[in-house]
Amino acid sequence: MTTDRPARPGRALGVDLGARRIGIAVSDSAGTLATPRGTLQRSGDAERDRRALVDLAVEEEAVVVVVGHPLSLDGSRGTAARAAEVEAEALAGLLADRGVAVELFDERLTTVSAHQALTAGGTRGRDQRAVVDQTAAAILLTAWLDARRVP
């Protein structure tokens, strides 16, 4: 599932898994820019949610899906991190025959950064809730893209 080798050129889909919502971001095909794509509301059916992510990855012509790995601040794996690992593994199984890789990427503080960025941009309260997950996904995907560029 997670690889240390560079993914082939193409679009990446960033996924910020939440209990109620899944934030989505997508990169350009050159792998230089991540843009918020939207938010999927959790349906209560994990398989249905996974199929929606697979459909989105195919629609966006993604070559890799980057799933946020919510490690604890000390780097340990708590309940949320283990749940993300299960989701990433399930997505990898569904996307393998389509040639789409799935990678976990450390997402510590992405939601905090998203709230700060939205507040700095003048978005407050209820308006933030509507876009914070996709903003967090874009921050996650930007960090992943940046890490890929480091020699």
Image: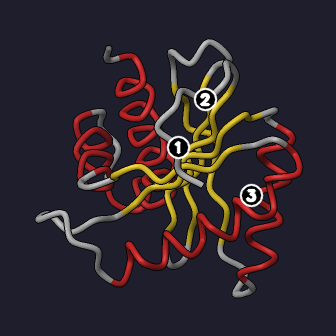
- Look at the image and tell me in which quarter the N terminus lies: bottom right
Q: How is the image coloured?
A: secondary structure
For marks 1 and 2, give the CA distance. 8 Å
Mark in front: 1 vs 3? 1
Q: Amino acid at mark 2?
A: Ala
| Quarter occupied by residue 47 | bottom right
What crowding class fits label 1: few (fewer than 14 Cα within 10 Å), some (14-19), or many (20 or more)?
few
Looking at the rendered image, the quarter that the C terminus falls into is: top left
- Residue 122 location (% of width, % of height): 29, 37
Identity of the residue drawn at 26% across and 55% down: 108
For image coordinates 28% across by 38% down, the residue present is: 117
Asked if residue 20 is positioned above or below residue 133 in the image, the reply reads: below
Image-based side of 126 in relation to 26, left or right: left
Q: Residue at x 34, y 53 (%)?
A: 107
Q: Which residue is mark 2?
A: 7
**Left of 128 or right of it: where is 89?**
right
* Secondary structure of residue under mark 2: loop
Task: Give the camera-side residue of 73 and 95.
Answer: 95
Going from the N terminus, do you reach mark 1 or mark 3 first?
1
Q: Report which residue position mark 3 lands on.
A: 53
Give the crowd class for mark 3: few <14, some 14-19, many >=20 residues within 10 Å: many
Kind of residue sitting beneath label 1: Thr
Q: Foreground residue, 128 or 143?
A: 143
Query: Dot 2: within a 10 Å radius of its alpha carbon, few (fewer than 14), some, or many (20 or more) residues?
Result: some
Q: What element does badge 1 sit on?
A: loop
Among numbered discs 3 and 2, the one appearing first in the sequence: 2
Pointer 1 residue? 3
Q: Residue furthest left?
A: 74
